[in-house]
Image (cartoon, grey):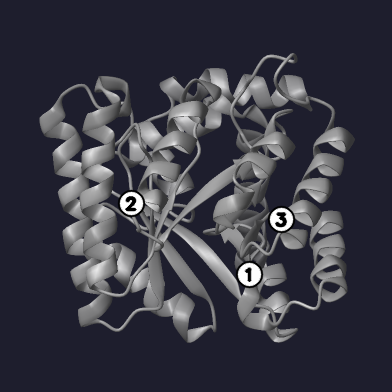
């Protein structure tokens, strides 16, 4: 299966752009803020929260970074005007991290202050390991500046994650905990599936023990089950944690979590850079390519069978 996944990824650049759009449209809201708002409205109607992400990474000029940062002005305005239950997620590379730490910090700080003025919240996404130290440092600096409406992401597959939880303990951080998707060297990241699971479980326990609000970001059934057991053990009220999933992934399981009384937030990316985002995500993690391919075939076949009936 791994060979098939890699074969799918290697063929992606040759796939016509309209076909990539067809495959990705279930997982990306669209190109415009109006597209994202429409998706969020539907999610809210189904009892789910959202986090909106403006697509754009690895910008090459300060102007491009400001363009992405300023796009969040429209996002917050739309959230307020349409009374959406949504916060936002940002990537520091999109804010200019690779152009200079201060560029990214200034853009992020402006976005977080704007969110605070509107009673909203900003989640700083975690990217590959070259960004980890700067991302954590900027998060700490914003918190020490008195900005409490900002959270961070920690990746369970990194060997450093438990140490990072310990170093952030004085902030009682609001954390999204995920497995992680970037391809990293074995010396800094677990590659074994069970080891990643085990570290996720340990990290979740440490965060709950420390009093953090945790966004439990996983589609892994075993981890979902164990997470529900952990939040019960730590006597967390419904408002003191949430589950998180990607748009278009395991939707039925998400519905079940909501029916069972858990809060669920869906990650809703949108933007003109949807094509680059789609290719990059699939190339970073070939397993996703195999999942999307099989999922797409699974959605198409019933229609064909129905047409023949």
Q: Position of residue 229 (x, y in %)?
A: 87, 69
Q: At 52% across and 20% down in the image, what residue appears?
A: 11
Q: Secondary structure at mark 1?
A: strand
Crowding near pointer 2: few (<14 within 10 Å), some, many (20+)?
A: few
The correct choice, above or below, for 156 with respect to 89 in the image is above
**Horizontally, is 238 left or right of 137 in the view?**
right
**Real-space CA distance between mark 3 and mark 2, rounded to the nearest whole angstrom:** 23 Å
> Which mark is nearer the camera, 2 or 1?
2
Crowding near pointer 1: few (<14 within 10 Å), some, many (20+)?
A: some
Q: At 74% across and 19% down in the image, what residue appears?
A: 3
> Which mark is nearer the camera, 3 or 1?
3
Q: At 24% across and 54% down in the image, what residue appears?
A: 111
**Horizontally, is 46 left or right of 103 in the view?**
right
**Horizontally, is 31 left or right of 291 in the view?**
left
Q: Nearer the viewer, residue 18 or 1?
A: 1
Q: Position of residue 150 (x, y in %)?
A: 41, 57
Q: Earlier in the sequence, mark 3 or mark 2?
A: 2
The correct choice, above or below, for 138 with respect to 186 in the image is below
Q: Which residue is mark 2?
A: 145
Q: Are marks 2 and 1 in contact (CB under 8 Å)?
A: no
Quick one: which residue is furthest to the left in this view? Answer: 63
Q: Quadrant of residue 77?
A: bottom left
**Real-space CA distance between mark 2 and mark 1, rounded to the nearest whole angstrom:** 26 Å
Q: Which mark is residue 207?
A: 3
Q: Which residue is mark 1?
A: 242
Q: Secondary structure at mark 3?
A: helix
């Amino acid at each position: 299966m791994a060979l098939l996944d890699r074969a799918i990824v290697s063929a992606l650049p040759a796939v016509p752009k309209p076909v990539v759009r067809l495959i990705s449209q279930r997982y990306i809201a669209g190109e415009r803020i109006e597209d994202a708002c429409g998706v969020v409205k539907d999610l809210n109607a189904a009892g789910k929260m959202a986090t909106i992400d403006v697509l754009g990474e690895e910008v090459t000029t300060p102007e491009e970074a400001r363009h992405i940062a300023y796009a969040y002005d429209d996002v917050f305005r739309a959230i307020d005007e349409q009374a959406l239950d949504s916060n936002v997620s940002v990537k520091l590379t999109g804010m200019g991290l690779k152009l200079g730490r201060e560029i990214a910090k200034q853009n992020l700080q402006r976005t977080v202050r704007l969110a605070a003025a509107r009673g909203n919240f900003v989640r700083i996404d975690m990217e590959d390991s070259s960004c980890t130290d700067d991302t954590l440092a900027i998060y700490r600096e914003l918190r020490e500046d008195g900005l409490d409406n900002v959270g961070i992401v920690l990746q369970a597959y990194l060997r450093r994650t438990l140490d990072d939880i310990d170093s952030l303990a004085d902030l009682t951080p609001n954390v999204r905990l995920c497995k992680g998707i970037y391809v990293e060297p074995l010396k800094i990241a677990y590659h074994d599936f069970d080891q990643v699971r085990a570290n996720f479980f340990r990290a979740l326990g440490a965060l709950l023990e420390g009093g953090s609000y945790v966004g439990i970001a996983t589609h892994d059934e075993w981890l979902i089950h164990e997470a529900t057991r952990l939040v019960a053990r730590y006597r967390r009220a419904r408002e003191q944690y949430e589950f998180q999933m990607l748009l278009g992934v395991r939707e039925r399981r998400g519905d079940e979590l909501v029916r069972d009384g858990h809060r669920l937030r869906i990650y809703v990316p949108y933007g003109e850079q949807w094509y680059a985002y789609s290719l990059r995500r699939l190339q970073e993690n070939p397993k996703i390519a195999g999942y999307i391919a099989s999922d797409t075939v699974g959605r198409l076949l019933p229609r064909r069978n129905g047409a023949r009936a």
